[in-house]
Amino acid sequence: QVQLVESGGGLVQAGGSLRLSCAASRSIFSSYDMGWFRQAPGKQRELVAGISNTGTTNYADSVKGRFTISRDNAKSTVVLQMNSLKPEDTAVYYCNARLTRSWGTFNYWGQGTQVTVSS
């Protein structure tokens, strides 16, 4: 079982920045693909950014050039740096850890952290 604890959400004006952190409980963190998802009211949860266990990153088109995901395997943490925030970035942001094995895929989620961007 993996426990994920997010921090860093809050209220910011449009154009501002926030840094989200996710701390994982397991020592085999480096084996997991990590990601940040978000869910706005009335909308489906969507992938914002992901980073594989080898460090390959991918981003939603809507955040490319503004958000950066990184990981520190020694500290079992993944960070989402969000710059040039827009009101449409307002959502609950969730940290995700995914472990893929030949017998299945295992997903773990944090409790979520609210990000609100005012116009």
Image (spheres, grey):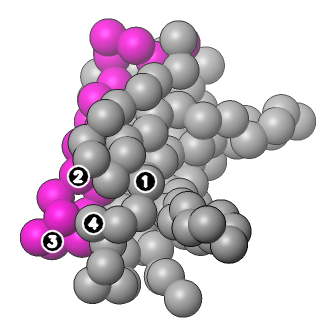
Q: CA distance from mark 3 to mark 2?
A: 9 Å
Residue at which label 4 appears: 30
Which residue appears farthest toward the front when viewing the image?
102
> Is residue 7 left or right of 46 when viewed as pictured?
left
Is disc 4 surrounded by few (<14), some (14 to 19) or many (20+) residues within 10 Å?
A: some
What label does residue 34 carry, if any? 1
Q: Which residues are magenta?
A: 62-82
Return the x and y of residue 95 as percentages of the image width and height. 50, 57
| Residue occupying image coordinates x 43% and y 73% | 5
Q: Does the residue at mark 2 contact the one at mark 1 (Cβ under 8 Å)?
A: yes
| Residue occupying image coordinates x 27% and y 84% | 27
Q: Earlier in the sequence, mark 1 or mark 3?
A: 1
Is disc 2 surrounded by few (<14), some (14 to 19) or many (20+) residues within 10 Å?
A: many
Q: Does the residue at mark 3 contact the one at mark 2 (Cβ under 8 Å)?
A: no
Which of 12/23 is in front? 23
Q: Quadrant of the N terminus?
A: bottom right
Q: Which amino acid type is marked by label 2?
A: Arg
Q: Which amino acid type is marked by label 3?
A: Lys
Residue at which label 2 appears: 71
